[in-house]
Structure formats: structure tokens, C-alpha cells
């Protein structure tokens, strides 16, 4: 991951530290130094931050390991100054599974807080939250109350916090999943506006929290709406059918000409009518930089991704692309390349489907194509593209 360092792996899940995290460590150290507490206090402040983020890592592993029980893998966990992010391959549609995954993280913080309380109780050194401050104070007491704060903050009923997913899980037990997501997102955005108002009157940091929550709610709602739009649609209904191909012996200069001639960014590489690789725009640029325009495409391409059939589920195909972090997938019919599924084409499909549904039509169809001024040839596989946008060149 860019700007991130791998710091360890547990149960097959890599943990990464984002470069911006060092800014927080440096700020804490300087805050202690500038208040005249010396190097020892500065080191104590850094130790507190590191222990706090150890608690955050354990919180994220609570989500990840619970997700593993339901067959859902976690790509990685990354630590940022504002907290940790566990990237699950997918969010389960089963509301009870989502509920357990969501509450597993805060449950870890509760366990940590109980353990810290017992240690402090034995030593008769428990103090209230009023004793918590950035500089100085009991390290264990600060960790106790910060863990409890993490529980409270994460259980706020707003995406992208765990409480937003808990709320959606409860709603999804009583209503359709997409509707439950939209209701939970609306509640989250309402809370974001409240945070923003309080931030204007009290603490400006709440403005940052408000933006974070509002964007997270909007992103979650958009993701689920896209997944619902893909349901029941075959790959043939959204693939790109007019595209350029390359041969392994073609020079990169030919790929440059194709890239500049149209909107296509990923080029299948065929040898004897078999897909042997894909030359993406990024791979093309890297190849040009390293080898020059006369270099053969075969030296710069990446191996061919798994292919899908015309009748494959678009929803499952998109999930495969997400899990493998692919930009495109070839579509085969009887072993012959007949189409491409690309992120760009999927975006166009969603835009067209949304526009049609706003006109009261339940799904994108040949009649919808005609309504947009696109000639509808019913003998060909359906394809979708935005009116006025140039088609990919053959």
C-alpha cells in the first residue's frame, strides 16, 4: 500500500502503518517537550499513543477474526492518526452475521477496559475521567478511559462507525437490506450535521468528525445501491463489446496510439485467439519509462486475470474484481473473447440504470436503450454506454 509500512502479520492478515501516523507520534512527543516535562515525559507520551493504537489493532482484529468465522477474509489492517481500518473483502448480507462482526470490535475494547480496571482496583489507583489529560497522569487510567471512549464513539449509530452497521443489522431484520442501509445512512448524515453545528459553536475538531461521518454514510449507501443494481444482471448486460486487442509482439508504441485514440484503458493481449495477458494504462506507462516505445507488449503486460462467461452473475463478478483488486476481466464465450468488464463500463452501467429508473422503468432494457437514442439490435449481447460518449474502437 502506498505510504504505508508493513509492521506484522497475524492469522494471515497484514498490519500496516500509514506514514501520517508518524505525525501524531511526533506531535505527542513535542507536546510533552514544549510543556517542560523533558525527554522522559515525551517518551511516556509516545508510549501511551503506541499502547492506545495497540488497543485499536486489537479492536480491528476483533472484526477481522469474527468475519473469518463466517468465511469472510480481511485484506489488511491499516493504522491512521484517526484510528484503524480493517478492509474486509465484503460485508455479509446476513444481518445477524453483520451484527456480530460489528460489535466484536467494541467488545474487545470492553474486555481491555475491564482488565485495566481490575489491575487498577488491585493497586487502589482507579481515578475518574476528570483525571485524564494529554500530558501527565496515570498511563493505565488514561488507557482505561480512552478504551471506554472508543466503545462509546464506535457505537454511535452512524456509518462508517460500528454503530452504523449495528443499526443497519437491526433494521435489516425488519426491512429490505437496501432500504435499511438508506435509513441508517440518513441517520448517520443527520448526526454528522449535528456534529458540524456543535463544532461551529464549541470544538472545531468536531467539524472534521462531521465530514468523516457524512462522507462515510454517503459512501456506504452508494456501495449498497450499486450492489443492488448488479443483482440479477448477467455479465452480458454490462460488458464492453467493442474494444481493441494487442499481440505480445506488438510494440508499446501501438498501445500508446490505441490509448490516445479512444476511452479504452485496459487492452487484452491475445496469442492465437487466447487471452495471455492484459496491458493496463499504468503498466503501459511503466513499460514506456523502463524500456521505451519499441519494447514488446509481452514484456510490460501482466498475466491474464480469471475470465468469466456471458451468463455469469454481474454481482459475483464485481465481487471477484474487488477481492482481487482488478480493473477489468475478460468475458469468454466458448473460449473466445467476446467482451470486457471494466470499472469504467460498470460506472456507465450504473449511471444509465439510475437514469432509467428515475423515469419509472424498473430495469435497463432494449426499450430503455431506444429511449436514449441508442439503436437496439436484439440479436447482439446487450451493452450500455452513456449517450454522447464515444464508443470504444474495435
Image (tube, rainbow, N blue to C red):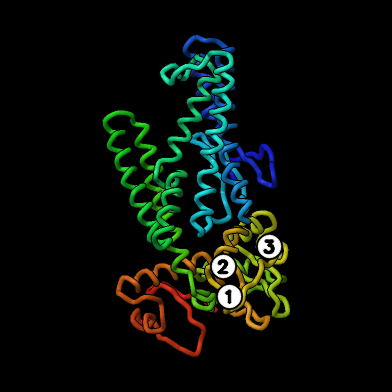
Q: CA distance from mark 2 to mark 3?
A: 23 Å
Which badge, 1 or 3, is on the more N-terminal residue?
A: 3
Q: Are marks 2 and 1 in contact (CB under 8 Å)?
A: yes
Q: Position of residue 192 (x, y in %)?
A: 34, 43
How packed is label 2: few (under 14 Cα within 10 Å), some, or many (20 or more)? some
Residue assigned mark 2: 316
User: Is 189 rendered above or below residue 197?
Assistant: below
Residue assigned mark 3: 302
How packed is label 1: few (under 14 Cα within 10 Å), some, or many (20 or more)? some
Which residue corresponds to the image point at 38% horizontal and 37% vertical from the top-left?
Answer: 208
Which residue corresponds to the image point at 63% horizontal and 52% vertical from the top-left?
Answer: 69
* Relative side of 221 to 138, left or right: left
* Relative side of 324 to 103, left or right: right
Q: CA distance from mark 2 to mark 1?
A: 8 Å
Residue assigned mark 1: 312
Q: Nearer the viewer, residue 22 or 185?
A: 185
Amino acid at each position: 500500500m502506498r505510504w504505508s509500512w508493513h509492521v506484522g502479520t497475524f492469522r494471515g492478515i497484514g498490519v500496516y502503518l500509514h506514514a501520517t501516523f508518524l505525525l501524531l507520534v511526533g506531535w505527542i512527543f513535542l507536546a510533552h517537550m514544549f510543556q517542560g516535562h523533558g525527554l522522559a515525559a515525551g517518551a511516556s507520551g509516545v508510549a501511551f499513543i503506541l499502547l492506545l493504537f495497540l488497543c485499536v489493532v486489537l479492536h480491528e482484529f476483533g472484526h477481522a477474526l469474527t468475519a473469518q468465522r463466517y468465511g469472510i477474509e480481511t485484506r489488511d489492517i491499516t493504522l491512521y492518526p484517526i484510528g484503524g481500518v480493517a478492509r474486509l473483502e465484503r460485508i455479509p448480507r446476513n444481518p445477524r452475521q453483520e451484527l456480530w462482526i460489528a460489535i466484536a470490535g467494541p467488545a474487545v475494547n470492553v474486555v481491555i477496559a475491564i482488565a485495566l480496571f481490575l489491575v487498577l482496583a488491585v493497586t487502589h489507583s482507579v481515578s475518574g475521567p476528570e483525571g485524564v489529560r494529554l500530558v501527565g497522569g496515570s498511563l493505565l487510567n488514561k488507557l482505561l478511559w480512552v478504551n471506554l471512549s472508543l466503545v462509546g464513539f464506535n457505537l454511535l449509530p452512524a456509518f462508517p462507525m460500528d454503530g452504523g452497521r449495528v443499526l443497519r443489522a437491526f433494521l435489516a431484520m425488519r426491512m429490505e437490506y437496501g432500504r435499511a442501509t438508506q435509513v441508517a445512512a440518513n441517520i448517520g448524515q443527520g448526526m454528522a450535521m449535528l456534529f458540524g453545528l456543535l463544532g461551529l459553536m464549541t470544538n472545531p475538531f468536531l467539524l472534521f468528525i462531521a465530514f468523516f461521518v457524512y462522507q462515510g454514510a454517503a459512501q456506504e449507501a452508494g456501495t449498497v445501491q450499486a450492489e443492488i443494481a448488479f443483482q440479477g444482471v448477467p455479465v452480458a448486460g454490462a460488458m464492453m463489446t467493442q474494444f481493441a486487442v494487442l499481440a505480445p509482439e506488438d510494440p508499446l508504441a501501438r498501445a500508446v496510439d490505441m490509448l490516445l485514440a479512444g476511452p479504452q484503458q485496459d487492452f487484452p493481449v491475445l496469442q492465437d485467439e487466447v487471452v495471455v495477458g492484459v496491458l493496463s494504462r499504468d503498466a503501459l506507462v511503466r513499460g514506456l519509462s523502463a524500456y521505451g516505445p519499441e519494447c514488446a507488449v509481452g514484456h510490460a503486460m501482466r498475466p491474464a486475470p480469471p475470465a468469466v462467461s456471458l451468463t455469469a452473475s454481474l454481482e459475483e463478478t464485481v465481487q471477484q474484481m474487488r477481492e482481487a483488486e482488478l480493473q477489468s476481466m475478460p468475458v469468454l464465450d466458448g473460449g473466445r473473447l467476446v467482451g470486457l468488464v471494466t470499472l469504467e463500463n460498470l460506472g456507465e452501467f450504473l449511471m444509465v440504470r439510475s437514469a432509467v429508473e428515475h423515469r419509472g422503468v424498473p430495469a435497463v432494457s432494449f426499450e430503455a436503450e431506444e429511449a436514449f437514442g441508442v439503436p437496439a439490435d436484439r440479436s447482439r449481447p446487450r451493452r450500455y454506454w452513456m449517450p454522447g460518449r464515444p464508443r470504444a474502437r474495435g
